[in-house]
Image: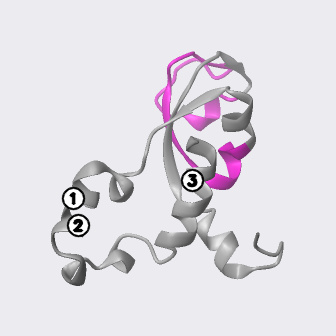
Amino acid sequence: MCSYYDVDSILAEEELVPCTNLFEFSHLAHLDADLNDKNYLPEGTRLKMPLWAIEKWATLGFIRLSMPRHFGRSSRERLEAEPAAADLRKRNDHFFLAGLKLVNLVE
């Protein structure tokens, strides 16, 4: 595991991860700017939040994670087709470390 003070680890945890909440949350409506009701975040709301903010929620089963675009199927197929031409840093400077942290939550 990475150190608490590891700058690369901190930056990798800033990866925005699409997620859907499985419960209604009170006092978290500010996470979705499109909501009119400022008290409740309704069940099924799709959000993009940093990895560090959703780690505990994902392990407790409060949210369902989706993979970011650059970890999706089409990106993997492009990488398998022509690995030398894939510029992984173009999408995320900490692609591999963010992927390791994300796979621990998905499994």
Residue 42 counted in the magenta span: yes
Marks 3 and 2, Cα distance to the nearest angstrom? 20 Å
* SS for dot 2: helix
Q: Reply above or below: 21 against 71.
A: above
Marks 2 and 1, Cα distance to the nearest angstrom? 5 Å
Task: Tally the numbered discs.
Answer: 3
Residue drawn at point x = 19 percent, y = 64 percent: 78
* Image quadrant assignment for residue 105: top right
Magenta residue span = 28-55
Q: Position of residue 37 (x, y in %)?
A: 59, 17
Residue marked by disc 3: 102
Marks 3 and 1, Cα distance to the nearest angstrom? 19 Å
Q: Reply above or below: 97 against 7.
A: above
Residue 80's tag is 2
* Image quadrant assignment for residue 59: top right
Q: Position of residue 82 (x, y in %)?
A: 17, 75
Of residues 24 and 86, the one nearer the viewer is: 86
* SS for dot 1: helix
Residue drawn at point x = 76 percent, y = 69 percent: 1
